[in-house]
Image (tube, rainbow, N blue to C red):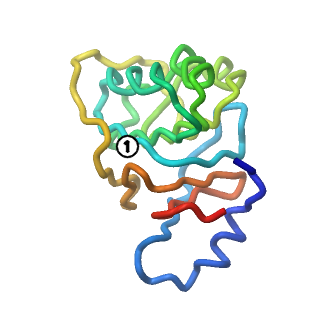
Amino acid sequence: MSLSFATCDLCDAHKNDTDGDFRVLPPVFKDYGQRLKFAGPVATVKCFEDNTLVKAAVDSPGQGRVLVVDGGASLRRALVGGNLGKAAAKNGWAGVVVDGCVRDSAELAACDVGIRALGLMPLPTEKRNEGQSDVAVQIQGVWVRPGDWLYADEDGIVIASKPLI
């Protein structure tokens, strides 16, 4: 897929859309991966301080998708670290967006994948095998559904119900 898009241009083109098919995530996410610009169809995981399903997702073929992780905006545990960042890059994920924290920032910066999160937290998660995959999630108050398209660049992250480019 060509990455010849700019989220600002997408917002200009869709700023008057009122059908809910175009959404913009709040500017609370920081960049941690090597790719500052990434896009693809969405896969989702909903979990809280347990990254069992995040690991299962990034260990599976990404096929250019973006994993959106609803971590409940927890700042107490890291849902993605260096090993999961490497797995996401190796398995062909375009990006991982975490409504929560990540760790191993130096390792993540070396991974050829887009990684966005709220912040850094060195504490790992507990492994309780809890959570859900492929469900609609609310990220910072914005609905994101499996099969939506996510576009991220230096200016922000937008979500659309269908491909925009």
Where does residue 53 sit, x and y in percent of width and height?
33, 26
Q: Residue at x 71, y 46 (%)?
A: 37
Give, as a three-letter code, the residue at label 1: Ala
Vertical arrangement, residue 162 with respect to residue 39, above or below: below
Q: Nearer the viewer, residue 64 or 117?
A: 64
Where does residue 162 sit, x and y in percent of width and height?
50, 63
Where does residue 116 sit, x and y in percent of width and height?
57, 40
Where does residue 3 sit, x and y in percent of width and height?
74, 51
Q: Residue at x 61, y 54 (%)?
A: 151
* Left or right: 35, with 117 as reference point: right
Neighbour tally class for label 1: few under 14, some 14-19, many 20 plus, Cα within 10 Å: some
Q: Quadrant of residue 90?
A: top right
Split into 4 quadrants, where in the image is the C terminus? bottom right
* Left or right: 92, with 123 as reference point: right
Question: What is the secondary structure assignment of the residue under circle 1?
Answer: loop
Vertical arrangement, residue 18 with respect to residue 94, above or below: below
Q: Residue at x 64, y 40 (%)?
A: 31
Q: Nearer the viewer, residue 75 or 154?
A: 154
Q: Nearer the viewer, residue 115 or 101?
A: 115
Q: Which residue is mark 1?
A: 73
* Left or right: 114, with 22 as reference point: right
Q: Quadrant of residue 27?
A: bottom right
Q: Residue at x 72, y 21 (%)?
A: 110
